[in-house]
Structures are given as structure tokens and as C-alpha cells.
DNA sequence: TATTGTTATACTCTATAACTATA
DNA sequence: TATAGTTATAGAGTATAACAATA
């Protein structure tokens, strides 16, 4: 996957930085008992009343992945499923008091990891990095080429 | 995984750009019948005589992953395993003529994908991006925190 | 004893398909 | 008919363990 260290290219640099940062983040969040997905759901659920489907959309997760993420949050006593008052099919993910406290802590953890990385660079470099990445995300790299869906046998 | 679009952070930007670029690269290489791993092995194998273990090290792959990658290269007629003259356990991965031609083509494909991305930015942005990423890779993000190894039952 | 390459397969992750209940 | 959430499980990807040949 990685090219030789002599000729680092954009793919190598992005893969490497995102992988290492993701690893750091996972380790930092694990110290307070969270995964990145749990953190993501916490911070979006605390903003306003949201259903599982809405939280899945925001976090770019499959609804089945959201099920296990919410299971984990419930098991940790951080959130609970409540029936929506407007749609009896839907579940609002409501944070417990412990969950709200955890949402604040985990955001501090995330910010800390980011500050440590960006703070290791000269200020202009850090600013330029964010600007360039943002321009790529908004522009040339905004849309992933979609892979053809995988065919699959019916159950049983 | 992704934060809300209103407050893009470093994690989101790196994950997103690396993921989309990786997708683009995979699609571009697939058009000439290669995976990213096959390309990686081709370009390192063409430089000098290298064994599977050396190529695995350079590409940061497990040796078992290297086996299936070399299998694919052989099946495509791009490379062949030759006994090393100095160590009868080791196999030199030698490119065929077709493999050498493919190595050149695939490097062009890779360079093209990178040029397209970097070329979409103002020149100073592109330069600053590479410099900042390189500084992170050489510095603060040089070493991933290692995850504890997964315990596993013995075979049978 | 240690290492190269191989095979077999255990494990994780993710997402599809099918289902229930509602809309 | 379509959608929210759930369950079960298929499939891809990866890496561990064990092994044979050689160092």
C-alpha cells in the first residue's frame, strides 16, 4: 500500500496521516470507554431530538451499524431509545445525564487529539492544511466513485 | 464517523479525502486490471531484485497478503517467482516484459490521479498541503499507537 | 533455533435480505 | 406501497497458527 519512503506521494501522505490520526483517536476515546461511532452519535444526539435514521445519516452509517452502536450506548448507560411522539415506528435517541456529561468529555478528547496534531505544525502550515483539505472536500474530492453493489444470495 | 458538515474537523477532512482518493485510485487502476497492492509490488519489484518478504515490508503488507498479491500478478502474466540465488527459501519476484510495461502504465495512472487532485487546487495550496502532510508524517503522526494483538484459538 | 513462503482458517467488519410494526 | 428499526447472516478482508523447506 505504501510507496517507498523516498518518494512520498499524496495517496501515501493522506493514507498515513488519516490512519495514524484515526488510531490515536480510537485509543484516546477507548480510555473513556467509547468508540468513534459512539462519540459521533453522542454529539449529534445531544444537539437536538434525533431518530436513529437521522443519526445514521449524519454519521454516514448503515442503519444496522447504528443498531449496534445504540445498543452499546444503552449498555453503557449513556443513552436510551424513546418512542417518537410523531412516528410510532421511530426511536428518539435520548442521552442520559451520564451521556450528556460523556458527550462533553469526548468532545474535549477529540479536540485535544486534533490540537496536538495541528499544534505540532507551524501555525501557517496548520491553517494551510485545513484550507487545502477543505477545498478538496468541497471540490475535486467531493464525490466518491461508487463501487458496484455486491450481489448476494437470499437468506436460507 | 463523519461530524456534521457545519464543523469539519481534521479527522473528517483526512478520512474523507483519503477515502475518496483511494476510491478514485482503485477505480483508475481497475481499468488496467490492477489493485493498489499489485501496483505497489510492481513498482518496487521493477527497481531491483527483491524477495516477497522485502516487498511485503516495503508495502506494509502481511506476508500472507503478499502471497495472494503475487498469485494475482502471476495469474495476470505480469510477474513470476524465481528462486533466489543466495537463499533457497526466498523467492525473487521478477517482472515479465508485460509486467515492466504495466509498471510504467500504472505509475502514469497513479500520477494522473494525483495530478488531477492537486491540480484542482491553487498552486500554493497544493504545495502547502504536501508540505504540511509531510511534516505530520515525519513528526507528530509518524508512529501509530499499536493495538493489542487479538488472541486466537489454535487451528483444529 | 530462526526465517521464507505456503496453506488453512478464525475473526472482524460491514451491509444485504428478510421481517415486524407502523405510515 | 413505503419506511423505521430489528435480526440473521453472507461476504470481503485480514491476519494468526501451523507447517515444510532451508538457514
Image (cartoon, coloured by chain):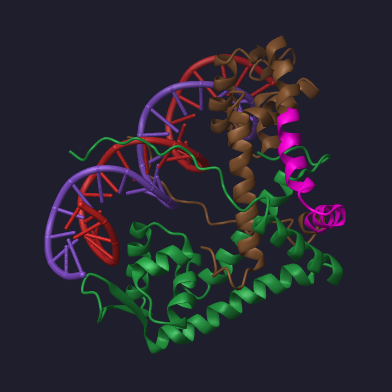
Chain colours: A green, B brown, C purple, D red
In this view of the protein, can residue B144 be seen by the observer?
Answer: no
Describe residue A101's horizontal placement relative to residue A96 as left or right.
Answer: right
Image-quadrant location for residue A149 = top left
> Is residue B131 in the magenta section?
yes
User: Which quarter of the figure is the C terminus of chain B placed in?
Assistant: top left
Q: Is residue B29 above or below residue B135?
A: above
Tell me what residue is drawn at x 61 percent, y 53 percent: A142
Q: Nearer the viewer, residue B149 or A88?
A: A88
Describe residue B112's horizontal placement relative to residue A137 as left or right.
Answer: right
Q: Is residue B67 above or below residue B133?
A: above
Q: Nearer the viewer, residue A109 or B62?
A: A109
In this view of the protein, can residue B88 be seen by the observer?
Answer: yes
Tell me what residue is drawn at x 81 percent, y 64 percent: A128
Tell me what residue is drawn at x 79 percent, y 42 percent: A5
Residue A48: where, in percent of width, then height? Answer: 43, 82
> Is residue A105 in the magenta section?
no
Amino acid at each position: 500500500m505504501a510507496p517507498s519512503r523516498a518518494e512520498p506521494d499524496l495517496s501515501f501522505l493522506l493514507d498515513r496521516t488519516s490512519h495514524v490520526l484515526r488510531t490515536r483517536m480510537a485509543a484516546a476515546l477507548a480510555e473513556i470507554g467509547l468508540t468513534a461511532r459512539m462519540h459521533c452519535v453522542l454529539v449529534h444526539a445531544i444537539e437536538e431530538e434525533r431518530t436513529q435514521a437521522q443519526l445514521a445519516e449524519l454519521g454516514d452509517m448503515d442503519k444496522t451499524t447504528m443498531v449496534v452502536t445504540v445498543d452499546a450506548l444503552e449498555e453503557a448507560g449513556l443513552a436510551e431509545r424513546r418512542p417518537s411522539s410523531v412516528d410510532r415506528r421511530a426511536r428518539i435517541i435520548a442521552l442520559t445525564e451520564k451521556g450528556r456529561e460523556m458527550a462533553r468529555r469526548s468532545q474535549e478528547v477529540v479536540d485535544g487529539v486534533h490540537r496536538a496534531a495541528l499544534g505540532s505544525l507551524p501555525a501557517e502550515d496548520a491553517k494551510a492544511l485545513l484550507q487545502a483539505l477543505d477545498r478538496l472536500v468541497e471540490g475535486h474530492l467531493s464525490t466518491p466513485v461508487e463501487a458496484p453493489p455486491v450481489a448476494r444470495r437470499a437468506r436460507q
